[in-house]
Image: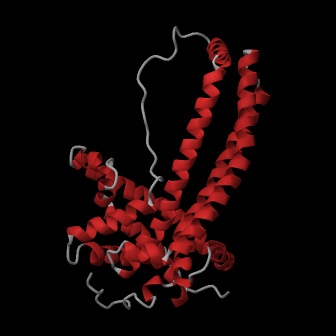
Amino acid sequence: MIAPANVSVTLPVGSAIDRVKRLLFQPFDLGKWFVIGFCAWLAHLGEQGFHANFPGNWSHGGGSPRHEFERARDYVASNLYWIMPLVAALLIVCLAVGLVFLWLNCRGKFMFLHCVALDKAEVSEPWRKFKRAGNSLFWFRCVLGLIGFVVVLPLLALAGMMVFAMIAHHHARAGAVLGLIGVGLVLIAVGILFGLIGKFTTDFVVPIMFLRGRSCRDGWRELLGLLSANVGHFVLYVLFQIVLGLAIGVIVLLVILVTCCCAGCVMALPYLGTVFLLPVLAFKRAYSLHYLAQYGPEYDVFLSPSAPLPGSPLPPM
């Protein structure tokens, strides 16, 4: 595969901004926002997570770490008859809900891409059209998650054993601390690796599947060929994504501050928060598409049969 001579990480910024303007503001249509926002909500379902703060004093007297650990261990040991079934039931429910969210997320990624690439506020059409592609992406991410679980679980167990040994001996030995730091660094490296796989899947494999109508495995096979011939370009892409993420974060924070946190309250609402952030989400989706299009017309989703030609007016809804 021949590497293209001119691949830029900055030029797609302007193209993505123009795409967002034409998609959401020329003309402004609130109904269109809500439809595309629904597709974007599905495409990001379960990815934002949540944070909870639990008030109260859990120290019960502020005993030593070993004393608190022994109290917790004794409590669990004496109540296993109801703790184990409860934990098992919660795990099963969480797993089932997580799989449903993941499946909807995979279908939503193709729906949102369809809307951004073709300037169409549609739900049912991309839902049907990309059923097989969405299911293929779902199974790929399930296998990837299982691999990640198998890799991470032993590392977490090892870290737990090290912490347990420190508590039991009332002493943090230098070797144990260094070992714990080493395990932590390995966990960070594994997290970065799986994070990159997930990002490349969303940014590039999904568009390739969108264009080719093939499975996720075939999409990754094609992307690996592209990556091997353009390693430097994609490294620069990842680094620039960090810069873009910081810039977007600053802009969102400024909007929250200027609106006296009212915008932050709206962003926290399911679905409505996605509609509010739709220009940001559409920009991020359009940016990766315009970047990928630089590798040739065969990677340009905007040149698909039902997409408008570059520079021509986008068709109305």
Image coords of residue 8 (percent x, y) = 50, 78
> Does 88 sit above or below residue 99?
above
Residue at x-position 52% and y-position 14%: 59
Image quadrant where one finds the N terminus: bottom right
Of residues 32 and 104, the one drawn nearer to the viewer in this rendering: 104
The quarter of the picture where the C terminus appears is: bottom left
Q: In this view, does 43 lie above or below 125?
A: above
Measured as percent of width and height from the top left, residue 130 is found at 50, 75
Question: Depth check: 241 or 128 in front?
Answer: 128
Rendered residue at 45%/78% (across/down): 290
Q: Can residue 197 be seen in this view?
A: no
Q: How many marks?
A: 0
In the image, residue 128 sits, relative to residue 180, either above or below, namely below
Residue at 34% in and 51% down: 270
Q: Work out whether 277 lies above or below 20.
A: above
Residue 134 is situated, as x and y percent measured from the top left of the image, at: 53, 69
> Quarter of the image holding residue 208?
bottom right
Q: Nearer the viewer, residue 146 or 261?
A: 146
Give residue 205's quadrant in the image. Answer: bottom right
Where residue 229 sits in the image (x, y, percent)? 67, 80
Q: In the shown orientation, is residue 65 left or right of residue 123? A: right
Residue placed furthest toward the right: 175
On the rendered structure, is 245 left or right of 316? Answer: right
Quick check: 137 left or right of 171? left
Residue beneath the point at 21% across and 67% down: 30
